[in-house]
Image (spheres, coloured by chain):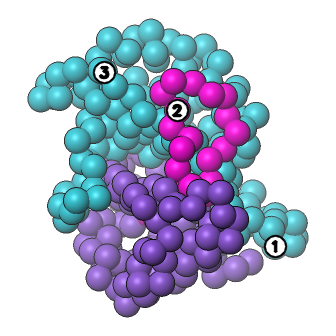
Chain colours: A cyan, B purple
């Protein structure tokens, strides 16, 4: 079991403990804050650039306030008008709250990722969502 | 513990078992397929419409191939050029694979949600991502 998975499962266990103690009132699954980022590469056909970006993204899982991660590429689901599959890579990071997201935003590991990888992309869109 | 949370934790436990058995090679956390949908309401200032949409979204958690859920609204993270906080509600559903997502797409509960709630939104954007 790698460190990332362990972190994620630890978070799930914490959530279970909270739920069992009746301490949780969240209607959706733990963790509460989702930071979802989509990247469009400058060279969308470059497997090498995609690999570099994904390698960079994986370093973000080490940041201590990150509670769960998912790094992906467009899935081969049904093509429909509402589906945007034009992006190159997708990053989801879960945090307990906005404070945790702020720690990540300012973290040296995150800054190094931007420094090392930002030349690869031409567009980034971020959606931050909190459980409702 | 509600049904949704139980489902999610059961999925996490399955993942842990797979990892312990050395059966998992995924680099990111389980589950592999993320279906992320953003909704822009016709009446973005209507708390009632938002509540109706969120109530509808929560019914989707009952679909048997859904492995985890997060329903949210824009978080109060730092305002930056790359952050899109113009949407009204966010839906994340996790599936094991594209087959699981297809079961959801065609499921009566999903169809009923669209029937009951689609008059509320003016725009929907879907991103489907598979672990990479």
Q: CA distance from mark 2 to mark 3?
A: 16 Å
Looking at the rendered structure, whether the residues under marks 1 and 2 are on a common chain is answered as: no
What segment carries the magenta color? B72-94
Asked whether B91 or A101 is in front, the reply is B91
Q: Which residue is mark 2?
A: B83
Q: In the rendered view of the protein, which quadrant contains the C terminus of chain A? A: bottom right
Under tag 1, what secondary structure?
A: helix
Q: Can residue A112 be seen?
A: yes
B6 over A4 or under it: above or below: below
Q: Quadrant of residue A55?
A: top left
Q: Chain of mark 3?
A: A
Of callouts 1 and 3, which one flags the residue occurring earlier in the amino acid sequence? 1
Tell me whether circle 2 and circle 3 mark residues in contact (CB < 8 Å): no
Q: Chain of mark 1?
A: A
User: Percent from the top left, x then y, of residue B38?
Assistant: 46, 55
Q: Nearer the viewer, mark 1 or mark 3?
A: 3
- Chief secondary structure of the magenta span? loop
B59 over B44 or under it: above or below: below
Under tag 2, what secondary structure?
A: loop
Q: Residue furthest bottom?
A: B108
**Residue at image location 27% in from the left, 56% down from the top:** A83
Q: CA distance from mark 1 to mark 3?
A: 44 Å
């Amino acid at each position: 079991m790698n460190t990332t998975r362990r972190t994620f499962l630890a978070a799930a266990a914490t959530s279970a403990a909270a739920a069992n103690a009746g301490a949780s009132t969240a209607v959706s699954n733990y963790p509460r804050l989702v930071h979802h980022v989509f990247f469009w590469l400058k060279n969308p056909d470059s497997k090498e650039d995609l690999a570099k970006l994904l390698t960079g993204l994986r370093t973000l899982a080490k940041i201590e306030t990150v509670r769960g991660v998912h790094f992906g590429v467009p899935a081969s689901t049904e093509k429909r008008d509402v589906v945007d599959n034009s992006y190159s890579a997708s990053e989801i990071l879960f945090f307990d709250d906005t404070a945790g997201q702020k720690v990540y935003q300012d973290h040296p590991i995150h800054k190094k990722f931007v420094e090392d990888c930002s030349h690869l992309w031409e567009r980034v869109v971020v959606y931050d969502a909190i459980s409702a």
